[in-house]
Amino acid sequence: MTPNSETAKTYPPSAELASKAHVDAAKYDAMYAASVADPAAFWGQQAERLDWIKAPTEIKNTDFTLGQVSIEWFRDGTLNVAANCIDRHLETRGQQTAIIWEPDDPSEPAQSISYADLHRRTCRMANVLESMGVRKGDRVIIYLPMIPEAAYAMLACARIGAVHSIVFAGFSPDALAARVNGCDAKVVITADEAPRGGRKTPLKSNADKALLHCKDSVKCLVVKRTGGQTTWTEGRDFDYNEMALEADDYCRPVEMKAEDPLFILYTSGSTGQPKGVVHTTGGYLVYAALTHEVTFDYHDGDVYWCSADVGWVTGHSYIVYGPLANGATTLMFEGVPTWPDASRFWQVCEKHKVTQFYTAPTAIRALMGQGNDFVTKCDLSSLRLLGTVGEPINPEVWNWYNDVVGGGRCPIVDTWWQTETGGHMMTPLPGAHATKPGAAMKPFFGVQPVVLDPQSGEEIHDSPTEGVLAIKDSWPGQMRTVWGDHERFEKTYFSDYKGYYFSGDGCRRDADGDYWITGRVDDVINVSGHRMGTAEVESALVAHEKVAEAAVVGYPHEIKGQGIYCYVTLMSGIEPDEELRKELRTWVRTEIGPIASPDLIQWAPGLPKTRSGKIMRRILRKIAENDYGALGDTSTLADPSVVDDLIENRMNRG
Ligand code: WT7
């Protein structure tokens, strides 16, 4: 994508929207200036949006210095996240809908869960977990479909001070086992089966397979979703539905320190195993709540829908924690955009009168290809705002979203952020900023983006410019550490560019000072808005007995944004054929999960390496992009002739 920001059409907010919005242009300017001039004063005041047991007096203690990176916000404050997301709303909103649940199959009834219901069900889940021996500080893995129990489980953990780690239901048994062991979890919460797009994933059976590779003491709590058959291990497996019937309706929320961990979420990086991103209690919730309210301009009575899965950070911050901390009505959808047909998203919007809709560009691209009728036959007049997240959005797709879905009435917030950042970092605010198709526009309050020269690491102050996107100084939603490996945290985010948080993304800042994200600058690719470390796919491939070596890169893919392109060198004596290609594809799916499924596999008799043995990925990327005319300098290769073979047999000729 090469956005021409200087000539891009801009879409200013309507006067009506600006006048009703939480934040208009003048307020943004004043608040942003205050937030960077005196972060402690600004965030100390913002912290008042939560109910603290002990209000914080020490607001900001943060240090980005390599070797002593330490991030603490509100450190002497205490609170409970579940009490903030539920209990404090009971008096005024007990009967208000907290969660609207829309099942995979549209013929199954939707559910409305009030704040009073949410309180009861969360308390029951908390009591069930306590009865299984879960205590403050223990880790609990959540491996569930998009059902209300996923939210109860998150909030139940928060209520008793347990640290949850959600594993996306699309991940394989091996990936699940790695995460259970990675954080030494006591309990895995799962369900019999996960319905999605009319198909069922056997979650319990996946969990059974995973638990074979875990300590014997790990217990399994099973929620009934489909009633599908499961095998049962007496003493290890617990029936949630049965236990919840007997559990007490009330469970006291535990007093937590602001810096106690709230959750761990594993995410891919440029090297090796996924890392456990740790978010803590106070700062995370302040940030998730404020960004939810301001970015989506959420008002009482709105019906807000984020179509993500709770297995990703988007689901944590913008389906559960942010909206519920604000006493909002949040919609949770179990299904997929294209089943039973490409109208499903819009039917759900019509059915529940959704006011704010937040989704990923990959979904919009897939639906755009199906034609406008699927959209226009639905009544979308309730929509007031649209959002996107996860990857850059091409201007054509932005325009379709704006014109066809939004009817030209709805501002689009293109929110740039990461698992690591806890909440939105850059986005236009709907009542404050003119939007530009494809631009993430402006920093959120307290966020100080900088563009660095990739070679020198110096800040570039002039605009327009392009470089590496880094953040100067901390914000409350920032991750605090990598679970069990603080050194890796420092090395990944603070060592390449000293004194800054390095995002891994590149960006442009246009002549107006607005930001455009250009994509990752490390070996992470973005497949349908899901982050994938190429190293992970490579290690899965070389774990196969017939594979000697593998190199994986991204290439442009019409629907997914980026596809997974694998160069594979086979063990000597192994003949490549279509059968083996299929086998490797299935292999990677079972090792990691369907989202890591290779799109293209090219047999590579050799890989381009330097004389010191380093694979030259730059060349592999170019060939995968079908842009082999401009390979640059290949003279440092140990054997330049391998490149000719790779070009000749390239898989992407589009
Ligand atoms: C990476 C983070 C944060 C929720 C979803 C993904 C890319 C995210 C945008 C955007 C361009 C974006 C970046 C980032 N990304 N939002 N609006 N425009 N790129 O979370 O899995 O942690 O991935 O997603 O490359 O680094 P994640």
Image: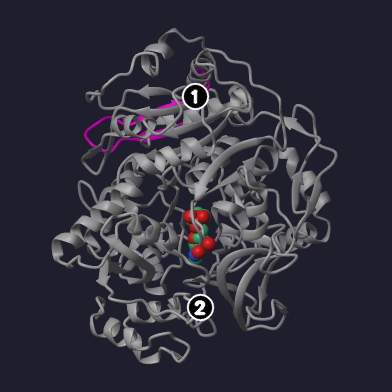
Distance (Cα) linking label 1 and label 2: 59 Å
- Determine whether, in the image, residue 127 is placed left or right of residue 576: right
| Residue 129: % across, % down | 51, 19
Q: Residue 356: in sight, yes or no?
A: yes
Residue type marked 2: Ser
Please name the residue shown 38% across and 77% down the image: 620
Query: Which residue is denoted by mark 2 in the rendering?
Result: 612
Q: Nearer the viewer, residue 645 or 424?
A: 645
Residue type marked 1: Leu
Query: Which quadrant holds residue 640?
Result: bottom left
Query: Which residue is denoted by mark 1 in the rendering?
Result: 118
Q: Nearer the viewer, mark 1 or mark 2?
A: 2
How many other residues sit within 10 Å of disc 2, few (<14), some (14-19) or many (≥20)?
few
Q: Is disc 1 placed on a helix, strand or loop?
A: helix
Please name the residue shown 52% across and 40% down the image: 182
Q: Is residue 216 magenta?
A: no
Indicate the quadrant containing the C terminus: top left, top right, bottom left or bottom right.
Answer: bottom left
Q: Which residues are magenta?
A: 97-120
- Determine whether, in the image, residue 22 is placed left or right of residue 178: right
